[in-house]
Image (cartoon, rainbow, N blue to C red):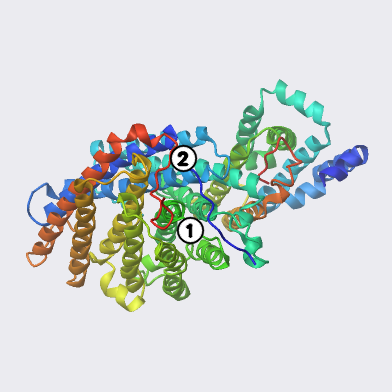
């Protein structure tokens, strides 16, 4: 996929821009934001994925110089962690629905403060750093899901309690599935090894 | 068809980090054994420390023993695995620092904060102390466990990285191409297969453990975020059982690596060996329900799964390892010294220690036996005469002055003291279980006290023997880091 993107960067960027605008249309927003599960687990991850793909379209040298400007891999990871954590807060979801500026902030911060810096950092993170980010993500996604399931009150004014519980269950299920996918990549090894050096970075990969 | 011949390998000395792990293991192990002795003497009415101190010591003894055997096992695994793959010393030391940080937190929680809810920290006990300890003390205990867990996650991520870089994937580290295809004789050595298995199961266990610890920390301060008690128990036992199971799979690497040096016979990574390790990789994650058989509220299929897989998982690695050890020792002309004796007896301890668990894993037996001293009888045999014997065998191997160095009479006496002391101590547990003495009781009925006294005397013999082992290792620390031939050649090979 990375190879395909790098072969046609112009067309890919155009397609990505169109998709981004499509997500921002009132119809798409209304439908995706009508339920908490779609809002948190479809729209937001898609915005992050847009940032990830956008970063991959940037030439390697530019990525490297941006990474140096941003202070290296760990500042980028920490920025992504903070920005994504903010959008996990129920009141942030409410704000995005009621305040247009918060909605704009969501559409800008998730691609550019989460997806984009994560890709910049990923190339430079050691396999242990990547593994640490992943294992932390799996356990905390499951815990967040549990918090949404057992919360004694309705945490968002804009969504019903059953929607909140559904979102929690989907997070738990997603964390389990993602964890097993990641373990699968460890078992298979992603083609890395003595005969097949890693192509995606400086000789280190963990998905 | 693969052929297996023994290729002599040099005996490498231990890195400073491995020695640091082992020295800390010696100190903590001894301290925890003394704590154990205090508890048995309290039950035997030989001393009077009171219920509060009994449960504080029990909490420290449980958490401390699980942690320290994991640390010692990690030292053995790391020492031999680094001879095959490129491991990071920095991560190895980071694990030690995080471990010590966690230990300080746990000690503060118990000794200063009076936390005494046992190492199992079962929900909702940590948050419902009835004024016996503060939420801060409970948080410090669980935070300490979390910090120790983070250290082990880092260590296993580094091991995974190294195995993937060398072999191309953890599946290859388990020898799947040779297991499911033709055996070309190029399967990874047993040390790599065992480390791969431990890494897979511990990563899963630790992620689950971190999740329940964070959930309980949230619940501690915001109780309205309720936790399903059965879910919490299931997650805690999954994490705890996988972690404590994994320690013997780390330590058994000493047997795989050292016994062949004594017998000059190879330990084969053949199809049967690989199949047993792959089977146990899966089964070790599903046997923990045998600790939950009394929780009738769990779904029936879950408990039946624990019963059946508990039966199945008892055997693959144990039989393959025990049979393999007998095959490479049989008529090999092996020269018995402290190292080879301890490693060989460790397989006996492992086999004998697994049997009470096998019996207790039967649902009808479990209803009667599980909350008795039968269960401590099981895991003390398995850990002391199995896992800990492997650790001491490894220490004697590292510290042996030269390949022909004789053992002193004191060491040989300590060996027999260790074996007899452990057997007497653990048999007292098992017999107390048979007469229905409950586990985790500070005070015992008069009918149970004689067995507690017998256990205390055997525990004293055991600790005296361990003191000799530790003293010998500490006096030979200088030798332990050097590279030279340690293992005595078998008589058939010696010139």
Q: Is residue B4 left or right of residue B63?
A: right
Instruction: Residue B12: give its label.
Output: 2
Label 1 chain ID: B
Which quadrant does the N terminus of chain B fall into? bottom right
Q: Viewer-proximal residue, B27 or B219?
A: B27
- Quadrant housing residue A118: top right
**Picture coordinates of residue B132, whole percent (x, y):** 22, 45
Check residue B265 in the rendering and tell me which mark sits there, or answer none: 1
* Residue B273 position within the rendered picture, expressed as x and y whole percent measured from the top left: 53, 64
Residue B25 seen by the camera: yes
Of the pair B57 and A50, the residue shown nearer to us: B57
Residue drawn at x 57%, y 41% is A132
Q: Secondary structure at mark 2?
A: loop
| Left-right relation of A103 to B378 | right
- Measured in 3D between alpha carbons, the distance from the residue under mark 1 to the one under mark 2, in whole angstroms, is 19 Å
Q: Quadrant of residue B228?
A: bottom left
Q: Residue at x 66, y 48 (%)?
A: A40
Earlier residue among tags 1 and 2 = 2
Q: Quadrant of residue B400?
A: top left
Residue at the farthest top position = A69
What x and y, as percent, mark residue A145? 55, 52
Looking at this view, name the residue that lies furthest to the bottom. Answer: B364
């Amino acid at each position: 996929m990375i190879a395909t993107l790098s072969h046609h960067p112009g067309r890919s960027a155009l397609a990505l821009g169109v998709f981004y605008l499509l997500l921002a249309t009132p119809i798409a927003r209304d439908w995706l934001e009508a339920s908490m599960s779609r809002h948190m687990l479809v729209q937001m991850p898609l915005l992050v994925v847009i940032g990830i793909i956008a970063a991959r379209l940037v030439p390697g040298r530019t990525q490297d110089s941006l990474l140096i400007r941003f202070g290296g891999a760990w500042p980028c990871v920490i920025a992504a962690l903070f920005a994504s954590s903010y959008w996990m807060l129920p009141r942030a979801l409410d704000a995005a629905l009621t305040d247009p500026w918060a909605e704009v902030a969501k559409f800008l911060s998730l691609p550019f403060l989460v997806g984009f810096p994560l890709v910049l950092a990923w190339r430079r993170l050691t396999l242990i750093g990547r593994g640490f980010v992943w294992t932390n993500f799996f356990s905390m996604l499951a815990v967040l899901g549990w918090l949404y399931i057992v919360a004694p009150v309705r945490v968002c004014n804009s969504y019903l309690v059953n929607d909140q519980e559904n979102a929690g269950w989907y997070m738990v299920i997603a964390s389990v599935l993602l964890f097993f996918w990641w373990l699968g990549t460890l078992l298979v090894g992603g083609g890395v090894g003595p005969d097949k050096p890693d192509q995606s970075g400086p000789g280190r990969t963990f998905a | 068809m693969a052929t297996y011949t023994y290729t002599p390998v040099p005996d490498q000395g231990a890195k400073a980090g491995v020695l640091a792990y082992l020295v800390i293991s010696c100190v903590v192990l001894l301290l925890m054994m003394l704590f154990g002795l205090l508890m048995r003497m309290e039950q035997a009415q030989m001393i009077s420390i009171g219920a509060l101190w009994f449960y504080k010591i029990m909490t420290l003894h449980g958490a401390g023993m699980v942690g320290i055997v994991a640390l010692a096992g990690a030292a053995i695994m790391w020492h031999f695995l680094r001879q095959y793959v490129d491991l990071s010393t920095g991560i190895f030391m980071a694990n030690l620092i995080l471990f010590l940080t966690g230990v300080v937190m746990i000690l503060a929680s118990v000794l200063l904060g009076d936390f005494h809810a046992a190492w199992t920290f079962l929900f909702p006990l940590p948050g419902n102390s009835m004024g016996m300890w503060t939420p801060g003390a409970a948080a410090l205990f669980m935070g300490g466990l979390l910090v120790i867990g983070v250290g082990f996650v880092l260590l296993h991520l580094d091991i995974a990285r190294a195995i993937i870089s060398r072999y191309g994937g953890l599946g290859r580290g388990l020898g799947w191409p040779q297991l499911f295809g033709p055996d070309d004789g190029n399967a990874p050595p047993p040390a790599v297969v065992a480390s791969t298995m431990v890494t897979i199961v511990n990563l899963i266990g630790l992620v689950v453990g971190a999740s329940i610890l964070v959930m309980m920390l949230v619940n501690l301060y915001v109780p309205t975020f309720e936790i399903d008690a059965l879910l919490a128990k299931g997650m805690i036992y999954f994490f705890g059982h996988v972690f404590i199971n994994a320690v013997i799979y780390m330590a058994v690497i000493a047997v795989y690596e050292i016994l062949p040096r004594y017998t000059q016979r190879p330990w084969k990574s053949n199809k049967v060996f690989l199949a047993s390790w792959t089977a146990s990789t899966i089964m070790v994650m599903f046997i923990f329900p045998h600790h939950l058989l009394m929780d009738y509220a769990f779904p029936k299929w879950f408990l039946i799964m624990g019963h059946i897989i508990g039966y199945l998982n008892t055997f693959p690695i144990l039989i393959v390892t025990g049979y393999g050890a007998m095959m490479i020792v049989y008529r090999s002309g092996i020269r018995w010294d402290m190292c080879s004796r301890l490693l060989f007896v460790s397989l006996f301890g492992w086999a004998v220690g697994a049997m009470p668990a096998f019996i207790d894993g039967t649902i009808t037996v479990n209803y009667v036996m599980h909350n008795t001293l039968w269960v401590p009888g099981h895991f003390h045999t398995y850990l002391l005469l199995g896992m800990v014997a492997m650790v001491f065998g490894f220490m004697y191997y590292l510290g042996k002055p030269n390949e022909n160095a004789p053992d002193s009479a004191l060491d040989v006496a300590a060996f027999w003291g260790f074996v007899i002391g452990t057997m007497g101590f653990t048999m007292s547990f098992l017999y107390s279980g048979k007469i229905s003495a409950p586990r985790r009781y500070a005070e015992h009925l008069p009918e149970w006290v004689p067995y507690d006294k017998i256990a205390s005397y055997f525990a004293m013999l055991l600790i005296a023997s361990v003191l000799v082992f530790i003293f010998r290792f500490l006096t030979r620390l200088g030798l332990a880091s050097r590279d030279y031939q340690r293992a005595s050649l078998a008589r058939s090979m010696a010139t």
